[in-house]
Image (spheres, rainbow, N blue to C red):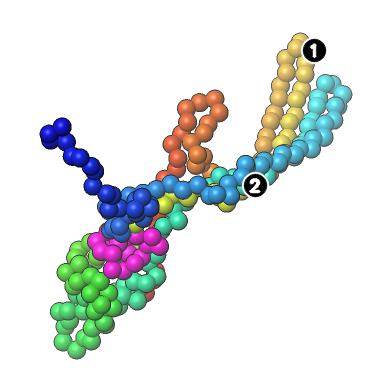
Amino acid sequence: MQGFPQELAPPNLQPTSFLTPAAQVRTNAPSVTVISPNLKLPTVHEWNFTIQHQFSGDFLISLGYVGNRGTRLFNIYDSNQIGAGPILPSFLAMQQNVRNGCAASGSGCPAGATPAAVPIVQQGIVNATFVNTSTTATDIAQNAAGNFATRIENTTLAAHLRPNQQFATIAYLDNSADSYYHSLQFVARKTFKSGLVLALNYTWGKSIDDASSNPVGVSAGGASPPPPPVRPSTSTISA
């Protein structure tokens, strides 16, 4: 029929090309969630030991220990965190310049002051205008090298501070978390002939874990909570 092509043009893209999107600055790059291919079911072991003694006068004392151990618990973290290591020499040089009364880039120094070279400016990764902004001045004053590195990665790809610049965050779910719980539980109870019962309960407990929230959004007996936020990349240094 007129207006319809006799044949379709051959494809000019490989399907696999969609699996490797072009590198983008962090603010425009997509985020992705990845599940470990070796994901296993979490395991929780529980144990307890209790001693009770009944005294005369219907008075009872109970002393017990309760513990549990969680292994292979679900954990989620950003495997594409920004690393501030490559820009630390530049950040230290910027701090030195500010202490000497210069602009962070090393320009505008007072008489007698020798500016420190800033590698990321010399290499053209960022320009002097970016380094001399008031936002950078705040990062310098607060030793916030991690925040400065994030701003660079939001602006340019030249610094290569993310392991994979095709994505912003790569939330990786695996079994790297575990937990411990130990508690000492004390109960004293007195029963009167009238049926009145007085009880005193005390629990001393200690819980240690490295993934307190539920990363997979599964909850028993209630609404499913959202996955926890991916841990941000931050670095703080002292000059």
Mark yes or no: residue 209 visible.
Answer: no
**Mark 1 touches mark 2? (CB < 8 Å):** no
Q: Is residue 174 above or below residue 2?
A: below
- Where is the C terminus found, in terms of image quarters? bottom left
* Left or right: 58 as drawn, with respect to 67: right
Which label belongs to residue 193? 1
Location of residue 2 by image quarter: top left
Q: Residue at x 16, y 87 (%)?
A: 111
Location of residue 23 by image quarter: bottom left
- Residue type pointed to by label 2: Thr
Q: Position of residue 85 (x, y in %)?
A: 39, 70
- What stretch of residues is rendered in magenta? 149-165
- Answer few, some or many: residues within 10 Å of disc 2's Cα (few below 14, many 20 plus, some between 14 and 19): some
Taking the magenta stretch, the answer to whether it contains residue 164 is yes
Label 1 secondary element? loop
- Where is the N terminus found, in terms of image quarters? top left
Predominant SS along the magenta part: loop
Q: Position of residue 142 (x, y in %)?
A: 32, 64
Taking the magenta stretch, the answer to whether it contains residue 194 is no
Label 2 secondary element? strand
- Residue type pointed to by label 1: Lys
Q: Residue at x 50, y 39 (%)?
A: 216
CA gap, disc 1 and disc 2? 48 Å
Mark yes or no: residue 153 visible.
Answer: yes
For disc 2, the marked residue is 71
* Left or right: 107 as drawn, with respect to 196: left
